[in-house]
Image (cartoon, rainbow, N blue to C red):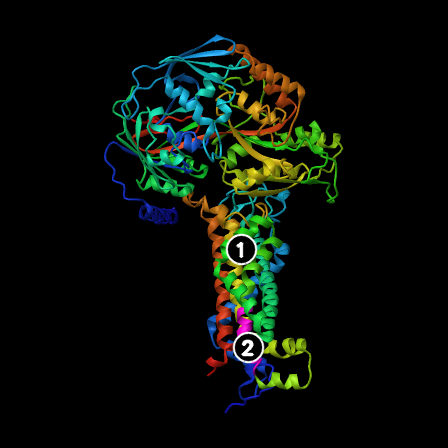
């Protein structure tokens, strides 16, 4: 214990030395992020840290509450006029930070800009495409689509509305400099120093509940232990993504309080199901074999080999929940029938033998290191479990940017690997997002299976997803989505492992309300 | 009273000749007690690494023998199989740390020595040719050496690993690429001096082939500085490999070297589970210090200018 204290002091001292001199007054809030936002432009990159940062300044027509349920934002109400037309009533009396009034013209301007940002590494086009926006009056907007589109409020909850007056012709740099960063949100832009600090100040003319904090300073501290040290040293008030190894210790620390909540992210495995010979699977003697992952019995066996409770307990330090499908209980469209696959190594061996692999085979598991909580160790643990049922598994992890590039298009535009560890957070907060992206047949033009890196394809499932997506009635759609999940999971299109739990830590006296979308935002921090 | 033997093959022979050159070398080397201890430790480390598979209780690279349920056990905890004790605890994946460290040491030493030897052979040959041929070839080679040395080694190694991928062989290739230039420069320097000496002229007059003059006559006389560079660069290669592994680009996750063990344990430091990083770090530190101590003493002994 003595040793760890000395070390801690050293780290804290180093942290202090590095920290920019930030004076803390009573109503300042200092938050530390695990990843750095790349722009103040809310349409530049659809990325959690960017979205969280920009939502201090900008607002959406529809907001998500902390469970990703759509609630009124800049639109006060919405309804369907007919199957293909939605009408949004806009909030009146809302003012931009520069004092000009918010109208339907700003919405139309935003929808024109959002899909067309230069050099965008992850565009919002996906959420705008196929929708026609028309102005009815200054505070009414209609959206029409070619097909019935039930996810309209969820889609519009992703697009930040920007000011036509301030942002006409604005480039991403103009937002970073603050010139175009004029929003309607609870905070006003103050400072953007990329990689160092992002500062916003309270908007005293805000239409909603005025924030507690007069000034919010957001800093990225990428290393987990350094983030914890900064909190303990009093350099910051809130940290996100507490390393799982520190959760138990912080729970016993009187100086901090923890907020932990279920995330919309599932950690799972994609399996190559389109090549007849897959590059990273061989027989035990190294010779080529036909792709065993095409056999559902092999996929089922691998799923049975995974000891999910052990992963949650030993590896994730209980900051996870064993997964049965794409989203945890409580989200829209999950199946109540599905249960996590039970750990059954003997059953797995039997299934492998039935499939013609009594002695298993050799496989390489690829994964990112540093994208998901404990991802590299997770890959290693699963490799242990596979090896025990006779599937000798090697692990190769690589930096996330390299990994995702190769996993999506490393083999001449097609996925390179045979068996990969990935995660998926449902941005819309319901099950159609993972179904559409992960297990629908890959079809770029239709926008289906865009992240289907195993190229799983099942016509029955495709039909079920298509039908669900065209159903406007909520109760009916939830049921159809659940059905589609069941088809995908029972056919083991992917192997799901666990849902992440996100953990925030604050200094004593503050409280963070956990959010399923993993956003770290000042309005979720309250005083106790 | 000193004897200057122009035809001497070994530079250490410039002493009264009561002992054989090797005996003199040993006598000179053992003058420093620290260096002697370092040498013994180095030999002990190498022997331990060599016989590791027969003395450790677990093969840490065999995933069937490693269990996640045994992860992060304190030093001194009995293994779940009950057959042995984890004297230094286990790491985050459940590997016995003693076993993992000795296996990691094997990799570290093998990578260091292999890349050191290959880089030496390559660099020495290139340096010799540069010095002997002279002219444009020499300029060209030495500018390439300068260019190579102007890049930080870690940066070049990182880029190469990113292109080549993971694995022991790839690490060796990367290390050889960043290190050959040191050898080339060292050898060229001393070869330039040697090639102007009379014995080389004499060899030319005898009509010996270029290759024979280069490798039979000049090279042996360039050996003393080369040996010093080899030891220092081997230590450097080991630390570079550890750095690459620490950054997560070196070796596969399931076959950790010392650097990867340190990196894996780093995240547990604040939780008080110090042993996962601490012991591998200690072994790495010791190995590098020991090699450097041996290298320093070799430099002193082999440098004629420092002879008393």
Total numbered circles: 2
Are discs 2 and 1 located on one and the same chain? Answer: yes
Chain of the residue that carries numbered disc 1 in the rendered image = B
The residue located at (42%, 42%) in the rendering is: A223
Note whether residue A520 is visible.
no
Would you name the residue on which mark 1 appears? B241
Q: Is residue B185 magenta?
A: yes
Residue in the foreground of this view, choosing between A465 and B254: A465
- Element at badge 2? helix
Q: Which residue is mark 2?
A: B192
Q: Quadrant of residue A520?
A: top left
Asked if residue B186 lies in the magenta stretch, the reply is: yes
Query: Can see residue B83?
Result: yes
Q: Is residue B218 left or right of residue A193?
A: right
Q: Secondary structure at mark 1?
A: helix
Q: Residue at x 54, y 49 (%)?
A: B97
Spot occupied by residue B148 in the image (x, y as percentages of width and height): 52, 61
Residue A239 at x, y = what percent? 37, 35
Q: Is residue B100 above or below residue A492?
A: below
Query: Who comes first in sequence, dot 2 or dot 1?
Result: 2
In front here: B51 or A365?
A365
Magenta residues: mostly which secondary structure? helix
**Residue, far bottom:** B1
Verify CB contact (< 8 Å) between mark 2 and mark 1. Answer: no
Question: Dot 2, how many residues are within 10 Å of its Cα: few (below 14), some (14-19), or many (20+)?
Answer: some
**Horizontal placement of A486 versus A128: left or right?**
right
Magenta region: which residues? Answer: B184-196
In this picture, is A288 found above or below B244? Answer: above
**Label 1 crowding class (10 Å Cα cut-off): few <14, some 14-19, many 20+?**
many
């Amino acid at each position: 214990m003595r040793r760890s204290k000395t070390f801690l002091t050293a780290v804290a001292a180093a942290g202090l030395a590095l920290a920019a001199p930030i004076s803390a007054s009573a109503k300042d809030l200092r938050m530390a992020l695990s990843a750095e936002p790349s722009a103040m432009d809310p349409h530049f990159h659809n990325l959690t840290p960017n979205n969280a940062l920009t939502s201090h300044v900008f607002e959406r027509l529809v907001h998500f509450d902390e469970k990703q349920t759509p609630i009124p934002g800049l639109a006060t109400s919405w309804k369907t006029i007919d199957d293909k037309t939605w009408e949004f009533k806009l909030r009146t009396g809302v003012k931009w930070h520069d004092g000009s009034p918010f109208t339907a013209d700003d919405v139309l301007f935003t929808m024109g800009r959002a899909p067309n940002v230069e050099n965008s590494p992850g565009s919002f086009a996906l959420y705008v495409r196929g929708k026609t926006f028309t102005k009815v009056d200054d505070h009414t907007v209609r959206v029409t689509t070619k097909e019935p589109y039930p996810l309209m409020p969820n889609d519009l909850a992703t697009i930040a509305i920007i000011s036509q007056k301030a942002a006409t012709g604005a480039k991403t740099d103009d937002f970073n400099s603050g010139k175009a960063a004029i929003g309607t949100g609870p905070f006003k832009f103050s400072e953007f120093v990329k990689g160092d600090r992002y500062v916003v100040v309270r908007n005293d003319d805000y239409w909603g509940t005025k924030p507690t904090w007069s000034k919010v300073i957001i800093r990225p501290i990428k290393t987990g232990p350094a983030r914890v040290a900064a909190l303990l040293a009093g350099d910051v008030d809130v940290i996100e993504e507490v390393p799982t190894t520190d959760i138990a210790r912080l729970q016993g620390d009187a100086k901090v309080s923890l907020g932990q909540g279920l995330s919309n992210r599932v950690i799972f495995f994609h399996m190559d199901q389109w090549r007849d010979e897959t590059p990273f699977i061989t027989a035990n003697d190294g010779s080529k074999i036909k792709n065993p992952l095409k056999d559902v019995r092999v996929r089922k066996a691998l799923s049975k080999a995974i000891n999910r409770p052990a992963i949650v307990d030993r590896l994730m330090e209980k900051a996870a929940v064993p997964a049965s499908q794409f989203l945890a209980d409580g989200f829209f469209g999950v199946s109540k029938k599905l249960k996590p696959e039970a750990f059954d190594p003997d059953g797995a061996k039997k299934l492998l033998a039935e499939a013609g692999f009594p002695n298993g085979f050799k496989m390489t598991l690829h994964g990112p290191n540093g994208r998901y909580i404990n991802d590299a160790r997770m890959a290693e643990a699963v490799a242990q479990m596979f090896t025990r049922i006779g599937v000798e598994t090697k692990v190769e992890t690589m930096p996330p940017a390299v990994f995702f590039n190769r996993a999506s298009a490393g083999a001449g535009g097609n996925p390179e690997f045979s068996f990969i560890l990935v995660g998926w957070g449902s941005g819309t907060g319901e099950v159609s997002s993972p179904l559409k992206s992960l297990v629908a047949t890959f079809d770029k033009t239709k926008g289906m299976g865009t992240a289907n890196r195993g190229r799983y394809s099942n016509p029955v499932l495709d039909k079920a997803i298509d039908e669900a997506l065209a159903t406007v009635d909520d109760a009916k759609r939830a049921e159809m989505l659940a059905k589609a999940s069941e088809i995908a999971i029972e056919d083991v299109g992917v192997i799901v492992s666990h849902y992440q739990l996100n953990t925030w830590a604050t200094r004593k006296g503050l409280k963070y309300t956990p959010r399923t979308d993993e956003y770290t935002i000042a309005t979720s921090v309250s005083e106790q | 009273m000193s004897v200057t033997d122009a035809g001497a093959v070994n530079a250490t022979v410039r002493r009264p000749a009561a002992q054989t050159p090797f005996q003199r070398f040993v006598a000179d080397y053992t003058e420093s007690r620290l260096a002697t201890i370092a040498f013994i430790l180095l030999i002990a480390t190498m022997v331990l690494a060599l016989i590791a598979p027969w003395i450790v209780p677990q093969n840490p690279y065999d995933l069937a023998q490693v269990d996640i349920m045994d992860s992060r056990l304190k030093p001194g905890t009995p293994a779940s199989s009950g057959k042995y004790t984890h004297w230094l605890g286990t790491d985050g994946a459940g590997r016995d740390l003693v076993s993992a460290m000795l296996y990691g040491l094997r990799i570290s030493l093998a990578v260091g020595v292999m890349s050191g030897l290959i880089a030496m052979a390559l660099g020495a040959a290139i340096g010799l040719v540069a010095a002997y041929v002279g002219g444009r070839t020499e300029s060209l080679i030495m500018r390439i050496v300068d260019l190579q040395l102007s890049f930080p080694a870690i940066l070049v190694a990182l880029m190469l690993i990113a292109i080549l991928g993971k694995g022991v062989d790839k690490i060796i290739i990367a290390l050889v690429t960043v290190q050959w230039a040191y050898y080339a420069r060292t050898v060229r320097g001393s070869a330039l001096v040697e090639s102007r000496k009379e014995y080389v002229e004499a060899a030319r007059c005898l009509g010996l082939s270029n290759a024979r003059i280069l490798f039979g006559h000049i090279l042996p006389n360039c050996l003393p500085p080369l040996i010093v560079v080899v030891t220092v660069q081997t230590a450097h290669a080991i630390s570079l490999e550890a750095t690459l592994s620490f950054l997560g680009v070196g070796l596969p996750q399931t076959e950790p070297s010392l650097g990867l063990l340190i990196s894996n344990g780093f995240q547990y430091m604040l939780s008080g589970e110090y042993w996962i990083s601490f012991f591998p770090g200690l072994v790495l530190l010791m190995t590098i210090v020991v090699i450097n101590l041996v290298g320093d003493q070799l430099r002193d002994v082999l440098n004629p200018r420092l002879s008393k």
